Image (tube, rainbow, N blue to C red):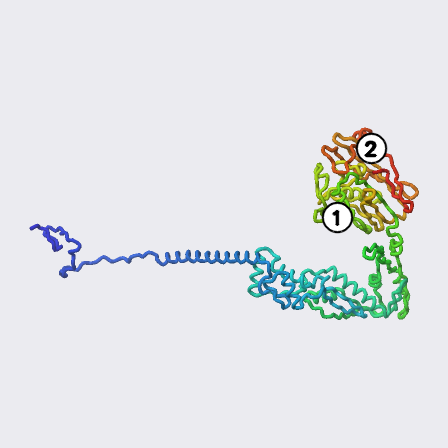
């Protein structure tokens, strides 16, 4: 046998014997000296708790991010839905009428059915001292909406903002609803309200003085010693405004307050002056009545002179303050007697060679300006008056100048009307505020006296810079095949205008200058000034009918070349003979 032991004990040589792992078994304890065991160090465990905490935090962040993303996506989706609606948002009502989910038309019908906004307007009655009654329009003050307008207002409240604002509005409506009023005062017309309040306060102040103040046609009679009271316009304004904004149209009664510290024998002459003061206002032409409006006579008095009269009087005396009356320059009677009494200008231009489409367009244009009246200071705009030329408006395609070319254009030919009108405006001595010459010369008027138009530009404009209204008469005379334009007005001073034109040769066309000279009734020159300069090019393609002249009215070869020292040669004046029944006569030196 081998010297190795299979019992796992040490052999005599002191070497340990090998024992297979599966053969090791706990043996019976052998009594020997107790073995001192080394102290066992506690095993350090991995920080599982911290690791779990870190993992949990990241999970929470991820979950929160997912939730936020879902919320954001939901809000975006809700916003897309809300902004895509064509109806009023949920839970929206107006004065008790539910409008949720309705279109504007449906909302208007619902409001009318519930007696909301059925009146065209609502009025607020205000009673002022001395029996003065004042009526305030809710509509004019911006505080009342009729049913159709109220429905639009309800829709705009929901959809009137941007994407985010509309989305927030939808959420608010869905959660808590929205109650609207047909009189929110969001668009309060403060100018209207102040004007009405000031007028009412003025009338009341006058009426309050009637017991001691008599305002006659030529004087004011004041009883010295009358008690002083006043109308607080600001307080009255705020009271009326609060009622309108809240939709309360119950009548208001206002009571005047005594002036603090006022003495019985004192008078505020400045306040009295402000109360009776009137600015003179000219009469104007009323297109509805076709008559002059009522003029306003100016009214004032001498404050210093009135103070002296007051100081010299005793309590109980009547102080008579003379009024200063000033008539306006144009009274109603004067204007009615002069309305369109004079023919200021007239001009006929030929339609020879024009197509039926071109004549159709010219007929439409003359009809648009025929009968038009401009009061003093008003401006005429050709494009604004005619509007855009479209087939729907009755215009047809005809030859026209555009971009330096002859083209077929809807409304072609209407420049003949604007040019003829330009000519008449010059002869009527009106102020030209916008005018552009044609690219090519025209045959129906001399060079420098035409005015081209297109949509939206160029435009032709002039202003009635006179003192009286003017009226345009425009038509197509089929007998003579001409465009006829006349301007009527008032010419009490008998002035007349002459237009002179001159031309000069250029390499590819020619230039033209017009001069306006104004004469008085005795033939004396009042003024003479350069009116306009024009630049024309020769045709390289056929022109629209009627064909322009091949050369300007004054032969370019006979005129000097343009230079700083060259002076254009004016054409000789030719005076047309006006109707013998019209005076004074407007005169021009050119014939077209």
- Quarter of image, res 416: top right
Q: Which residue is mark 2?
A: 554
User: For this view, does 136 lie left or right of residue 108?
Assistant: right
Residue 122, by quadrant, is bottom right
Where is residue 338 drawn, in percent x and y?
Answer: 88, 52
Badge 2 density bin: few <14, some 14–19, many ≥20, Cα 10 Å: many
**Residue lying farthest left?**
1
Q: Residue 67 appears at what percent x and percent y?
A: 47, 58
- Residue at the image point whose x is 75% and y is 49% from the top: 385
Report crowding for label 1: few under 14, some 14 to 19, many 20 or more residues within 10 A (C-alpha): some
User: What is the x, y in percent for residue 115?
Assistant: 67, 68
The quarter of the picture where residue 453 lies is: top right
Q: Along the polypeptide, which appears first: circle 2 or circle 1?
A: 1
- Do the residues under discs 2 and 1 have CB atoms within 8 angstroms? no
The residue located at (87%, 49%) in the rendering is: 490
Q: Secondary structure at mark 1?
A: helix
Q: Residue furthest right?
A: 522
Residue 116 image label = none
Q: Is residue 26 left or right of residue 207?
A: left
Residue positioned 80% across, 64% down in the render: 202
Q: Is residue 567 left or right of residue 27?
A: right
Q: Nearer the viewer, mark 2 or mark 1?
A: 1
Q: How many marks?
A: 2
Label 2: state its secondary structure. loop
Which quadrant of the rendered structure holds the C terminus? top right
Residue toward you, 46 or 415: 415
Nearer-the-camera pick, 35 or 77: 77
Q: Residue placed at 87% from the left, 65% from the top?
A: 215
Question: Is 480 left, or right, of 172 in this rendering?
Answer: right
Q: Which residue is mark 1?
A: 386
């Amino acid at each position: 046998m081998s010297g190795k032991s299979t019992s796992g004990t040490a052999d005599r040589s002191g070497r340990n014997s090998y024992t297979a792992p599966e053969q090791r078994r706990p043996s019976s304890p052998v009594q020997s000296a107790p073995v001192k065991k080394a102290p066992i160090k506690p095993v350090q465990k991995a920080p599982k708790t911290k690791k779990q905490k870190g993992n949990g935090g990241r999970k929470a962040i991820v979950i929160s991010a997912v939730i936020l993303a879902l919320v954001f996506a939901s809000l975006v989706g809700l916003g897309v839905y809300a902004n895509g609606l064509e109806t009023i948002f949920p839970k929206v009502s107006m004065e008790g009428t539910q409008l949720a989910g309705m279109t504007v038309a449906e909302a208007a019908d619902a409001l009318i059915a519930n007696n909301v906004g059925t009146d065209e307007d609502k009025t607020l009655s205000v009673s002022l001292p001395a029996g003065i009654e004042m009526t305030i329009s809710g509509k004019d003050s911006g505080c009342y909406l009729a049913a159709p307008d109220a429905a639009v207002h309800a829709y705009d409240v929901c959809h009137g903002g941007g994407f985010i604002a509309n989305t927030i509005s939808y959420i608010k409506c869905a959660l808590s609803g929205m109650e609207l009023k047909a009189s929110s005062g969001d668009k309060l017309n403060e100018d209207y309200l102040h004007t009405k309040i000031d007028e009412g306060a003025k009338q009341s102040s006058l009426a309050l003085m009637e017991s001691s103040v008599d305002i006659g046609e030529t004087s004011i009679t004041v009883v010295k010693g009358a008690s002083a009271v006043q109308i607080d316009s600001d307080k009255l304004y705020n009271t009326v405004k609060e009622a309108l904004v809240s939709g309360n149209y119950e009548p208001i009664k206002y009571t005047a307050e005594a002036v603090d510290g006022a003495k019985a024998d004192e008078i505020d002459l400045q306040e009295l002056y402000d109360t009776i003061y009137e600015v003179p206002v000219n009469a104007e032409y009323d297109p509805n009545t076709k008559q002059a409006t009522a003029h306003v006579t100016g009214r004032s008095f001498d404050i210093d002179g009135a103070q002296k009269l007051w100081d010299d009087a005793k309590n109980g005396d009547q102080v008579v303050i003379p009024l200063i009356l000033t008539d306006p320059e144009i009274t109603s009677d004067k204007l009615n007697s002069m309305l369109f009494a004079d023919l200021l200008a007239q001009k006929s231009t030929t339609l020879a060679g024009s197509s039926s489409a071109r004549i159709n367009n010219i007929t439409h244009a003359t009809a648009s300006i025929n009968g038009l009246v401009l009061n003093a200071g008003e401006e005429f705009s050709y494009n604004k008056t005619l509007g855009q030329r479209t087939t729907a408006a009755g215009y047809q395609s005809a030859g026209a100048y555009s971009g330096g070319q002859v083209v077929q254009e809807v409304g072609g030919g209407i420049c003949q009307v604007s040019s003829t009108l330009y000519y008449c405006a010059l002869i009527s001595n009106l102020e030209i505020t916008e005018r552009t010459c044609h690219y090519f010369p025209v045959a129906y008027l001399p060079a420098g006296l035409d005015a081209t138009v297109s949509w939206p530009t160029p435009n032709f404009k002039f202003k009635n810079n006179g003192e009286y209204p003017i009226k345009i008469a425009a038509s197509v005379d089929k007998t003579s095949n001409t465009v006829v334009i006349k301007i009527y007005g008032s010419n009490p001073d008998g002035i007349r205008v002459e237009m002179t034109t001159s031309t000069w040769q250029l390499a590819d066309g020619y230039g033209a200058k017009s001069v306006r000279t104004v004469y008085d009734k005795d033939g004396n020159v009042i003024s003479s000034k350069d009116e306009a300069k024009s630049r024309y090019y020769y045709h390289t393609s056929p022109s629209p009918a009627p064909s322009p002249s091949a050369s300007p009215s004054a032969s370019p070869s006979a005129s000097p070349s343009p230079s700083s020292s060259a002076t254009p040669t004016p054409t000789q004046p030719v005076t047309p003979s006006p109707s013998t029944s019209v005076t004074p006569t407007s005169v021009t030196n050119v014939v077209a």
